[in-house]
Amino acid sequence: MMVLAIRTDQPEAELYVYEGKKKINALKWQAHLKLAETLNGKIEEILNKSSISYKDLHGLAVFKGPGSFTGLRIGVSVANALAYSQAIPIVSRGGKNWLEKSIKDLQAGKNDKIATLQYGAPPRTTQPKK
């Protein structure tokens, strides 16, 4: 099972490609304020370095938080779009062992269908004017 994993909750973004439980490739870069501009290109880069295409992916794993609101939102949005467009399962997990849990769950046939977020705090939004 070929899995692409995405973590975007910190200034240094991370991508991984796994075949089964074996890590094939990893890519980390200082995305910080350029995550939306760089994420899709970096996904292409890691797939090319791993000699695989989008059609070779069997699942997606994404870090769901807690972490940066904007970083998580961008990463999960891209992961959800990719999972939908390729018709592959997606799981979102948090915590220290998120990657191991994600791969294990994908191998067990789990599919969240839509990855969700866990920001770690309630959103601070402006109240609507009455």
Image (cartoon, grey):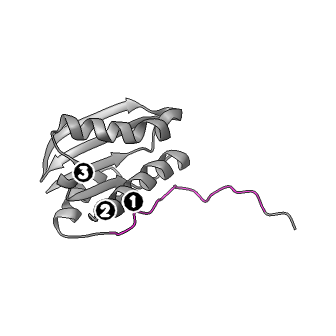
Q: In the rendering, which numbered label is found on residue 90?
A: 2
In the rendered image, residue 97 lying in the magenta stretch gets the answer no
The residue under the point 45% across, 39% down is 10
Q: Which of the two discs, 3 and 2, labels the residue nearer the N terminus?
A: 3
The residue under the point 21% across, 53% down is 3
Q: CA distance from mark 3 to mark 2?
A: 14 Å
Q: Position of residue 69 (x, y in %)?
A: 54, 49
Mark 3 residue element: helix
Q: Position of residue 62 (x, y in %)?
A: 35, 54
Q: Amino acid at mark 2?
A: Ile
- Choose top left, top right, bottom left or bottom right for residue 130: bottom right
- Left or right: 90 as drawn, with respect to 48: right
Residue 94 is at least partly visible in this image: no
Mark 3 or 1: the one toward you: 3
Q: CA distance from mark 2 to mark 1?
A: 7 Å
Bin the neighbour count of mark 2 within 10 Å (Cα to Cα): few under 14, some 14-19, many 20 and up. Answer: many
Q: Amino acid at mark 3?
A: Tyr
Q: Amino acid at mark 1?
A: Asn
- Disc 2, disc 1: CB below 8 Å? yes
Q: CA distance from mark 3 to mark 1?
A: 14 Å
The residue under the point 45% across, 44% down is 9
Residue annotated with mark 3: 54
Q: In the rendering, which numbered label is found on residue 80?
A: 1
- Choose top left, top right, bottom left or bottom right for residue 42: top left
